[in-house]
Amino acid sequence: MQAKNFLCLVLLAGLGGCATLPSSGPTGKQIEKSARVPEEGAPIELVEIRTVADVPNVASDAPAVAALPELAPPPTDMIGPGDVLDINIYEAGVTLFSDRGGAGAANQVAAAPGVQVQKLPPTRVDDAGTITIPYAGTLHVTGTTTGQVEAMIRNSLRRLSQNPQVLVTLSQTITNSIIVGGEVAKPGRLVLQTNRETLSDVIALAGGYRGNAKDLTLRIVRGGRSVDLRVNDLAENPSSDIRAYPGDRLMLINNPRTYSVLGASGRVEQIPFGRSSVSLAEAIATAGGANPSLGDPAAIFLLRYVRDERGNDVPMVYHLNMMKAGTYFVAQRFPMRDKDVLYFGNAAANQPSKVIQLISQLFAPLLTVTSGIQALKN
């Protein structure tokens, strides 16, 4: 009799603790209630997803690219600080640079009968954007082309030499180049040969990317502004594959997109995108769906931040009832975004089964002991 009384006391204690049974998270009703009346923080918008018209649009990369200054491509022979010029001066008759005991005569060769060419040492454009030419003086060349520099030198020497001809070429190009780094085969300085190269062209010229394109982010820094693009989007959205511009800095960053699965699902973890785009239906399937013992298919929620017209991040909760056939078609058109949270609500109807399971776990050892005592008495 005492054993039975003890069992009853334990049973009552177990039933008294049913309100605090362990669970994997709130039920669908609790999520909806807390979203409509948040206890603290910014208000949360709850959106019921019933038709394709309720599916939010995924922001494209066009606005991000538009944030960069739109600049017309400069001439490919534009000169700036740091560039190194090769300068050859051609003279006929009595030459200005003829050998008069000067050291420069060593670089003087005969280009044709009666014509001498003076090869000046490599000339670097200084930080002030100037170069110094014997007899011509200091010339400001930043922002000019090689043809314009030829004319400047020729005009400076015209009174001192008989019809001098000047040829200027770029030996080392700094101005008409960009810096490429990160997950590329050949990081470093890349000279733009045509100034018509697009972002995808630059990646190819740098030896291509390393890793998987869906996991890579291309960061573009231009004119003090920075924009991030997914490498995959350059192929899928040609309007975002804009031209590179001299002075750009490009960095390929390994930044896989992921979404988190929480609640009463088949698996609780952070899952990477399997492809460049993943639908909500695929995400639910990858997560194993709602747990048959705990989850409620009618209480599946997607939580994300959405940027409003003022540029503020607004918390949004999208609710899907997977007990309705039409929702499965809608979920196929619902695109996932990076850092989304997919939550499977707990089923309130599963609470009694949890109680029974808890009672059986508590009393199985006691019933075994009681049976043993009864056997000894008999």
Image (cartoon, rainbow, N blue to C red):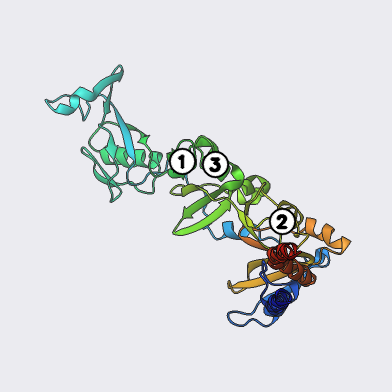
The answer to whether 146 appears left or right of 334 in the picture is left
Judge depth for marks 2 and 1 and give the one in front. 2
Q: Quadrant of the N terminus?
A: bottom right
Mark 3 lies on residue: 197
For label 1, the crowd category at 10 Å Cα-Cα, with few meaning under 14, some 14 to 19 and many 20 or more, is some
Q: CA distance from mark 1 to mark 3?
A: 12 Å
| Residue 17: quarter of image | bottom right
Mark 3 and mark 2 lie on one chain; the one further toward the N terminus is: 3
Q: Position of residue 315 (x, y in %)?
A: 63, 72
Q: Amino acid at mark 2?
A: Gly
Using the image as rendered, state which of residue 102 and residue 325 is in the foreground: 325
Element on which disc 1 rests: loop
Mark 1 and mark 3 lie on one chain; the one further toward the N terminus is: 1
Judge depth for marks 3 and 2 and give the one in front. 2
View extreme (right): residue: 325
The answer to whether 352 appears left or right of 251 in the picture is right
Mark 2 lies on residue: 266
Mark 1 lies on residue: 76
